[in-house]
Image: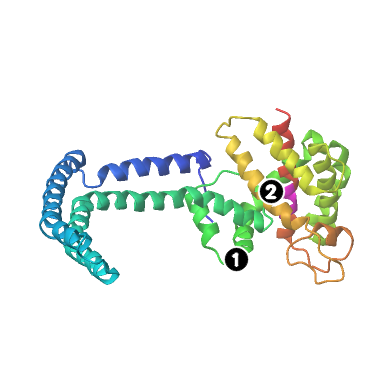
Amino acid sequence: MCKKNKNEFLTNTQSDSFKKLINQTSEIEPTIDYEKLFKDTSKSLAFELGNISNTIAKNINESFVPEFERLTSANNKIKISEFSQFAASISDSLAPEIEKVTAGLSDAFKPINIYFEKIYAETQKIASEIAKPFVMLKNLGENQFVYWDWFDNDFCNEVLSTDDINNLLFEYYSQDNFKRINETIDRCKHDSIMKSYSELFSQAIICYQNKQYNISILGLIAIADSILSEVTQNETHRYKARVERIKEELLKKGSYSPEDFSLIALYFTFRHMMDSFYKTFPFDGPEPELLNRNWLMHGRSRKDITQLDCIKIINYLFGLILFNKSLNE
């Protein structure tokens, strides 16, 4: 996992992509004056259309009008078959002229179409680049990894290209002797909202450090449940109502600083994580593959909880703390 520059935020990725769009489209066929090309082709096309119109009018006057008058004269008994043949002859006679019109249109606009096709192709590529961070956040959240930190394009590519996202994330957190998660634990410990849970949190972390992950995760989830109720002012265990409260508060802000994009990243991953973590699975069925709050807290889980599982819940807990800070600013 690559190291990142703290000055690289999501907003930089987007703005760089837009700059790239502007630069690349300005470099496409720079020697062609498309305004002049359009005017010239329009004049040429108008001239050709005039010639074609005159030809069509001549054919109508010389051939079709006399034939139509013959068919409709008082002395001639009208036959449906003759009218059908007459209509077909009109269509056949005009077909070559119509083909000239369509061919002329195609040829006249071909250079301009090529230009805009190039712009469209470049726009598609850049739109894909802009979407990458959000796809990455979705992948993290769906794997129950709450994320709020800065990231760069290399990090996005690693997350999007890996076949084993859990292994990638464990490698990420194991760098520098698990420095990142240890800093997160310390920040959780010293936040004011943790005051009421200091004893339980300390015991849960001691179990985590002693590799007693099955015990540690239960204490961490109990704290997270309680803080989630505090942050959202919702005492029920219905997580969607709680998360909607967080979203409502985010929307009230109206404008966002570059730092706020880390909060948006947090919300993206948080919401996806919660969808699976709080999802109801019947206890008489198979245990869900991902961590599930109900199965764990009701003693139904038979999973061998790992260090990464605990890291995910610690991140989730710290995410709640960050939400609480944001909503109270």
Q: Earlier in the sequence, mark 1 or mark 2?
A: 1
Toward the front, the furthest residue is 75
Q: Residue at x 36, y 44 (%)?
A: 21
Camera sees residue 146: no
Q: Specify start and end residues of the magenta stretch as a single range.
A: 311-316
Along the viewing direction, whichever of 278 and 321 lies nearer the viewer: 278
Percent coordinates x, y for residue 255 in the rendering: 58, 30
Q: Residue at x 75, y 46 (%)?
A: 317
Q: Is residue 247 left or right of residue 13?
A: right
Instruction: Please name the residue that numbered disc 2 is placed on.
Output: 270
Is residue 62 rendered magenta in the image?
no
Quarter holding the C terminus?
Answer: top right
Q: Secondary structure at mark 1?
A: loop
Can residue 77 be seen in this snapshot?
yes
Q: Which residue is mark 1?
A: 164
The amino acid type, in three-letter code, at marker 1 is Asp
